[in-house]
Amino acid sequence: MGTRSHFSVLFKAAGWQVNHIEGSHHILINDHSEIHLSIPVHKNKTFGVGLLKKLINKAGMTNEEYLKHFYEK
């Protein structure tokens, strides 16, 4: 998998934006949702598959929608 900061960039490409940073977590929001995503950003650490799937699901995206942004980057 990629680094955690890489995944934060991919959610941004999907329309999420950083609202604020709490410690080592980027809190992302989307204009079309009241949900926020908390992305842990630790230098050179990677996501586990389970955490990534939970974030994709919480963002209301399908795996295919997320992968579209992954391959466009």
Image (cartoon, helix red, strand yellow):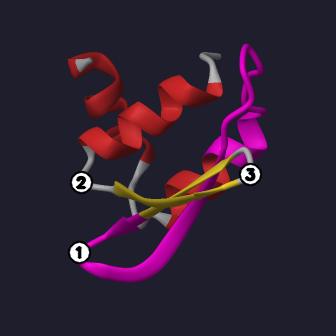
**Which residue shows up at 60% across the image and 16% down it?**
2
Residue hosting label 3: 23
Residue hosting label 1: 31
x then y, percent, for residue 39: 62, 49
* Marks 3 and 2, how far apart at CA: 23 Å
Name the quadrant containing residue 65: top left
Badge nearest the viewer, 3 or 2: 3
In the depicted structure, whether residue 32 falls above or below residue 17: below
| 3 or 2: tag closer to the N-terminus | 2
Q: What secondary structure is marked by label 2?
A: loop
Is residue 65 among what the camera can see? no
Name the quadrant containing residue 66: top left
State which quarter of the image contains the N terminus.
Answer: top right
Amino acid type at image mark 2: Gly
x then y, percent, for residue 25: 67, 50
Residue hosting label 2: 15
> Which residue is nearer to you in this view: 1 or 16?
16
The stretch of residues the image draws in magenta is 29-52
